[in-house]
């Protein structure tokens, strides 16, 4: 586990702590990562149990060997598998808070062997759970130009999706490392476009491949209703997203939880009026302060949304 030398700031940590319910006894963290949020939440002596899951086995092994706190209960797996863990506090809707801090951790991004970085050379992998499914390279070897192109369009929103897909598809057997992949992507893009771009030419494609191989958006979409169900009345779901694709899913779901109560009663057929499932804390959510972006530039695109279950 490469924690050494990595200064880690949990993203939006002030806002996370400020938005937890005042009496927090049982907390579920679906994205334990370096345990940054866990450490902060566990400073509160009222916390009885903190359930931390991560799909990266290195994270779980790290905390097994370096016990953070006896109240931290560790699980290896995807947070979408939480219903199968048979944790009574989840099954019986006793949680005070659920925290999902989506995406990759710094140790994953900075370790070239994990294949997330287009700036450091490594295998074309990008799996957060490296015991599951197949790597990006294996997927690219099987996929058609159309499939690759669709993934780059849907999850990277890159207008040159077809051109990039064709270049990768033609050369895939000779592309063995992340730097080689990044250079194939850059070389097929118009020079004028690259000059105008503020980000590296491979940024959107790498993001798209990572989201696809880890099935990130489907997992999020399919888990939010379940997590609302695990909360007790007044419990809160806190979700931190890093790009608009994730944030859109969270915002849309929170709105559907509010929707019916937003409709004037007289517009609904009699007897069909349902109360909202809770309320949103801050309509726009929370973005990092200037101070946080100075402290931790990687936090700049983060947004926290909070939903409180009906009391
Ligand atoms: C942004 S980091 C979380 C950082 C953490 N909140 C902290 O303060 O240290 C995201 C972590 O969640 C994990 N992860 C992402 N999606 C997951 C999922 N669907 N299920 C389980 N773990 C996930 C990643 O492996 C990574 O370790």
Image (cartoon, rainbow, N blue to C red):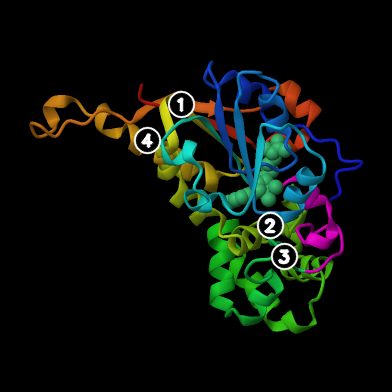
Secondary structure type for disc 4? helix
Q: CA distance from mark 4 to mark 1?
A: 17 Å
Task: Give the foreground label among 3 and 1.
Answer: 1
Q: Is residue 33 left or right of residue 78?
A: right
The residue mark sitting in front, 4 or 1, is: 1
Residue 294 x/y as whole percent: 79, 26
Residue 128: image tag? 2
| Residue found at the very far right of the displayed protein | 5
- Residue at the location (53% across, 60% down)? 154
Q: Circle 2 sits in a helix, a strand or a loop, which is it?
A: loop
Q: Is residue 305 above or below residue 203?
A: above
Q: Is residue 117 magenta?
A: yes
State the CA–CA distance, disc 4 to disc 3.
40 Å
Contact check, label 4 and label 1, Cβ < 8 Å: no
Residue identifier under label 1:
235
Q: What span is in magenta?
A: 103-123
Mark number, residue 255: 4
**Quadrant including the C terminus:** top left
Cα separation, mark 3 vs mark 2, equals 32 Å
Q: Is residue 128 above or below residue 262?
A: below
- The residue drawn where x is 42% and y is 34% is 93
Pointer 3 or 2: first along the chain = 2
Report the Cα–Cα distance between label 3 and label 1.
50 Å
Q: Earlier in the sequence, mark 2 or mark 1?
A: 2
């Amino acid at each position: 586990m490469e924690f050494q030398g990595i200064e880690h700031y949990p993203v939006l940590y002030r806002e996370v702590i400020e938005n937890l319910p005042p009496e927090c006894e049982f907390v579920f963290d679906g994205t334990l990562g370096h345990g940054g949020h866990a450490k902060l939440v566990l400073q509160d002596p009222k916390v009885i149990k903190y359930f931390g899951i991560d799909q990266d086995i290195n994270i779980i092994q790290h905390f097994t060997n370096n016990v953070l706190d006896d109240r931290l209960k560790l699980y290896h797996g995807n947070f979408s598998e939480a219903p199968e863990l048979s944790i009574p506090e989840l099954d019986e809707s006793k949680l005070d808070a659920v925290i999902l801090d989506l995406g990759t951790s710094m140790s994953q991004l900075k370790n070239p062997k994990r294949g997330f970085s287009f700036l450091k050379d490594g295998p074309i992998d990008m799996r957060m759970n490296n015991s599951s499914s197949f790597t990006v390279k294996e997927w690219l070897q099987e996929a058609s130009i159309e499939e690759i192109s669709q993934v780059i369009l849907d999850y990277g929103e890159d207008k040159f999706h077809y051109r990039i897909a064709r270049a990768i598809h033609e050369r895939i057997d000779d592309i063995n490392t992340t730097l080689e992949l990044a250079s194939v992507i850059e070389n097929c893009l118009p020079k004028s476009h690259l000059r105008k771009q503020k980000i590296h030419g491979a940024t959107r494609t790498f993001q798209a491949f990572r989201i696809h191989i880890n099935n990130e958006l489907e997992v999020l979409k399919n888990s939010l209703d379940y997590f609302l169900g695990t909360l007790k009345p007044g419990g809160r779901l806190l979700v931190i997203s890093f790009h608009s694709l994730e944030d859109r899913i969270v915002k849309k779901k929170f709105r559907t939880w509010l929707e019916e109560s937003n409709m004037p009663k007289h517009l609904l057929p009699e007897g069909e009026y349902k109360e909202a499932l809770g309320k949103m804390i801050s309509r726009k959510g929370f973005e990092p302060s200037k101070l946080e972006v100075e402290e931790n530039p990687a936090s700049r695109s983060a947004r926290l949304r909070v939903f409180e279950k009906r009391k």
